[in-house]
Every structure is written in structure tokens, then in C-alpha cells.
Image (spheres, rainbow, N blue to C red):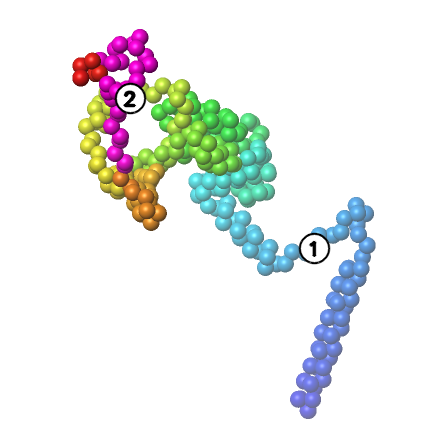
Amino acid sequence: MALQEKLERFKKQHERCQATMTSIAASKAAAATQKPSSNGRNPAPAVKFSNDTERLQHINSIRKAPVGAQMKRVIDLLLETRQALTPEQINEACYVDMKANKDVFDNLRKNPKVNYDGQRFSYKSKYGLKDKTELLHLIRKYPEGIAVIDLKDAYPIVMEDLQALKAARQIWLLSNYDSQEDIAYPNDPKVHIKVDDDLKQLFRSIELPRDMIDIEKDLQKNGMKPATNTAKRRSAAQIQGISSKPKPKKKKSEISKRTKLTNAHLPELFQNLNNS
């Protein structure tokens, strides 16, 4: 008897659950068929709880990060966009809330890579360049070379312009052997470069190998790429049957007694003839 009563109660609970689920489904269908709001915009889709939770956790982790990490995030944003942004725009783009974090705000305002005009933050490179013409003009001001690392953030395509100037032989890009950093030098014959006497003497005291192949090997040992490939050139010459040895110069012919003299009024030309 008790079992029968329990079954009856279970059936009633099941019927109530079915009715509740039916009403919920009906309310969702009615909401989907509602007209747009008076402002002409459709209501924003509801954000799933799981996705919203992940986003909030991500924002919270950024704002709890060290000051240096938040500053780097903002500087990377300013470098990428190359735009002047307000603190609100920065917060919206990378979730760094500078209004709520005074340390981040003050340190960014004083950072040498950031410009702050009182309202907006923007990226500040070491050299304010805009194009290839200004880049070349700047390099020509430094006949002793300028580090490429100081130029690479001047404007977005500065590295491509450096390679274009190098290809056009307007500049040289040479590597510093100690730091392995590229240095840009102007390739302008008008530029006067002063070389110390000690460096001249050191250069002249270096004894170079007689064979060009040995010179190329020494360059490679010191981390420099030779401009020539003598081994390849010689092998190609042997395949084509061309001798790689230089041809002996012909002996300059001298005037003999049998030479017809047409410039008799220039006796100094015929001293060898008179003495023979």
C-alpha cells in the first residue's frame, strides 16, 4: 500500500515538471518572436555563462599582473597601432585599467617609449622618421654608423626600407663582431670619414694570404660573408676550359731602326733608337 502511494506522488511530481518545462519553452519562443526594440537595434545575444566567466578571469589576471607586465602590454599596443589612445580606449583594447592603477599610469607617463599629451598616450620612437627619404637623411648624419636597433621601431616598414637602401648601394649594413648587431653606414663619397693613425697602421701591418681562397676562409672564420666565391669561380672556369691563371702581359715593343719615323720633330721619343 505504501509503495502505491509513493508511485502516485512520483507521477504527480513528474507531471508538474513537464508543465514547468513546457511553460519555459513557450516563454523562450515568445521572446524569440518579439519585435526589435524602438531604437531599431536587435537585442544583443545572451553571453554564455562559461564564456563570460573565462573572459572575466582573463581580465582579472591581466589587472593583477605586475606593473611592468601591464606596461609592456600597453606599449606593445601603442607600437602596433601607432595611434594616440585615451586610457579608456587602452582599457577596452587590452584590459589594462590605468585609471584604477595609478602606478601603471604614472610609470607609462614617464616612460621614454611613450608620449603623453595630457589626454592620450602614443608610441615614441628614438628617431621620429616617416619614410625612406628621412631615413637616408638621418643615416648620412652619422658617418661613423648608427645602430639598426635604434631605427627598427621608427615606423612600420623601416626594416624593408633599410634593405632597399642597401640594395641601391646608398648605405652599408655591417655587423658588429662583438655584439652581432647591424650598423648602418652611409655610402656617400662626399662624406668625410676620419680614420685614426693607429687604425691605419694596424690595417697596413696585417699580412694577407696570397691566395684569394685563404682570404675568404679567414673572413668566414671571423663571422663575415665574403663577397666572392673563388673556389666556385675556378671550378666553373675549369669546366669551361678557361685557365684561372692570369695571362702574362705582352712585352711592350720598342722602336727599332727599321721603324718608320713619322714624329721626327719629337727627338726624345727616339733616344733608345739613337743609343742602340
175 and 229: which is toward the camera = 229
Whether 37 is drawn above or below 169: the answer is: below
Disc 2 marks which residue?
195
- Residue 198: horizontal and vertical position, in percent? 22, 23
Q: Secondary structure at mark 2?
A: loop
Q: Secondary structure at mark 1?
A: loop
Q: Residue at x 57, y 43 (%)?
A: 93
Q: Which kind of residue does numbered mark 2 sit on? A: Val
**Dominant secondary structure, magenta:** loop
Numbered disc in front, either 2 or 1: 2
Of the image marks 2 and 1, the number of the one nearer the N terminus: 1
The reply to whether dot 2 and dot 1 touch (C-beta < 8 Å) is: no
Q: Residues within 10 Å of mark 2 (few under 14, many from 20)?
A: few
122 and 191: which is toward the camera = 191
- Residue 40: horizontal and vertical position, in percent? 79, 47
Asked whether, in this view, residue 224 is left or right of residue 43, the answer is left
Residue 45 colored in magenta in the image: no
Residue 114 visible from this viewpoint: no
Disc 1 marks which residue?
45
